[in-house]
Image (cartoon, rainbow, N blue to C red):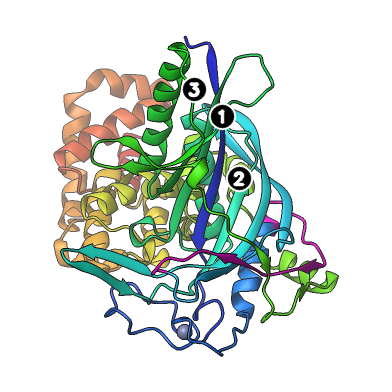
Amino acid sequence: MSNYEMVIGIEVHARISTKSKMFCGCSNDFFGKAPNSTVCPICMGFPGVLPVLNKEALEKGIKAALALHCSIPEKSLFDRKNYFYPDLPKAYQISQWDNPVSIKGYLDVLVNGEKKRIGITRLHLEEDAGKLTHVAGGTLCDYNRSGTPLMEIVSEPDIRSADEAVAYAEELQKILRYVGSADCDMEKGGMRFDLNISLREKGTEKFGTKVEVKNLNSFRSLEKAIHFEFERQENLISKNEKIIQETRGFDDVKSITVSQRTKEEANDYRYFPEPDLPPIYTEKDYVENLKKQLPELPTDRKERFMKDYSMSEVDARILTDNSDLADFYEKVTKLSKDAKRSCSYITTNMLALMKVQNIGDIKLIKISVQNLADLIKKISSGEINNNIGKQIFEIMFNEGKNVDQIIKEKGLIDNSSDDNLEKWVKEVISENPGPVAQYKSGKISVIAFFIGKIMAKSQGKANPGKVKEVLERMMN
Ligand SMILES: [Zn+2]
């Protein structure tokens, strides 16, 4: 066990899912588009142009902040963050500094079964920079990303381990998706993390020298960067060497952090209020109205699922990780009136097939709420047995047809077995005199034994309900 503990704060950048960019009418849907095809004089930083705040971005930013229990000051300001680099054609980024759109929230996360509250310092709005590609002999500039809307969520230094950091980042992603403020698609750079990390002796209050690790673009690299930094810093301290306050990058291939610049070379951004944009005034009614629009949040929904549908924490978490999946489950259950079987079909059979077929989005599956509910109803009523049910489910998943269609086309329930039922019942009765005597002496439960025998004779195709009916008639 180490004598040291980590003190971690995380800054999360998430692209706000709007139609247009933060301060101009250009499309925010730039991924995969030809370089410099979604740009205009405003996001290209031409002189003399004026930015106009995107209302949708403000609204979605505030909704995210409210979901993170932040308060919304009545007045907030945009500021210019000055730095000179070719990804930023204006030579300044419009961001927010000491008057952000929201402050002082928190997020509760579950880490190894225990609840931990992580403070949120602020959520502010800003624009993204362009993208540079360094090639032999020069640098290519693509300004499609320039001016796209971001929210930056800054946590308090409340995080103590890589597990907590990842739990925080995952929960944040879930919430931003639930409220519809950001899709947080990390493969498209829709969510990235900057890390502040320092070490201190356990039991002490004073912070150590902090190191910043910038631009982590997956939960994995977030976790690996923390593990690496802990070892690196602990190693330095144990050798009595000084930790340098610096900014480091993360090398994904080698899983190490690398020094980029030290404090002496740190940028002085010379923040000052953006003169081209008026202050944002958020009236109480406006904020209250946005609050009312917030959906039930993932943790609340998970707890309600456990209570309302008597399901395990694991199942509830799987179903509520994604709001579309949770909606799908609730609709199926409402129609099928069998919460337990609906849960098991979705969490096991359906998610397994989605995984095998690499379908990441429930909106893309062929199976409809109604068809799945019909199937579950027929299984619950005994009209279809479990084995056939699973076969029908797979066909339904692949072909999108309804239960009756599938049964008819694939001959899954052999109606001719009805004609054989009496014959099988007779056989089973004569083959099992012992259980017959038990039944006649009042042990009705042995009926299950007979049903099983007959189902086997029919190779699972007989209708268990009918089998029971015929059995009872012939045994009495
Ligand atoms: Zn533009």
In this rendering, is residue 227 above or below 77? above
Residue 439 drawn at (x, y percent) = 37, 24
Closer to the camera, 325 or 25? Answer: 25
Over which residues does the magenta segment extend? 66-87
Alpha-carbon span between mark 3 and mark 1: 9 Å
Residue 372 drawn at (x, y percent) = 37, 60
Q: Main secondary structure of the magenta part?
A: loop
Label of residue 191 in the image: none
Give yes or no for contact between labels 3 and 1 (Cβ–Cβ under 8 Å): yes
Query: For residue 119, what is the image quadrant?
Result: top right
Of mark 2 and mark 3, the one earlier in the sequence is 3
Please name the residue that numbered disc 2 is placed on. 299
Of mark 3 and mark 1, the one earlier in the sequence is 1
Q: Secondary structure at mark 2?
A: helix
The kind of residue on which mark 1 rests is Thr
Q: Nearer the viewer, mark 2 or mark 3?
A: 3
Queried on whether the Cβ of the residue with tag 3 lies below 8 angstroms from ligand 1, the answer reads no
Of mark 1 and mark 2, the one earlier in the sequence is 1
- In the visual, does 106 lie left or right of 450? right
Q: Is residue 316 visible?
A: no
In this rendering, is residue 96 above or below 425? below
Q: Let me know if residue 109 is in the magenta part.
A: no
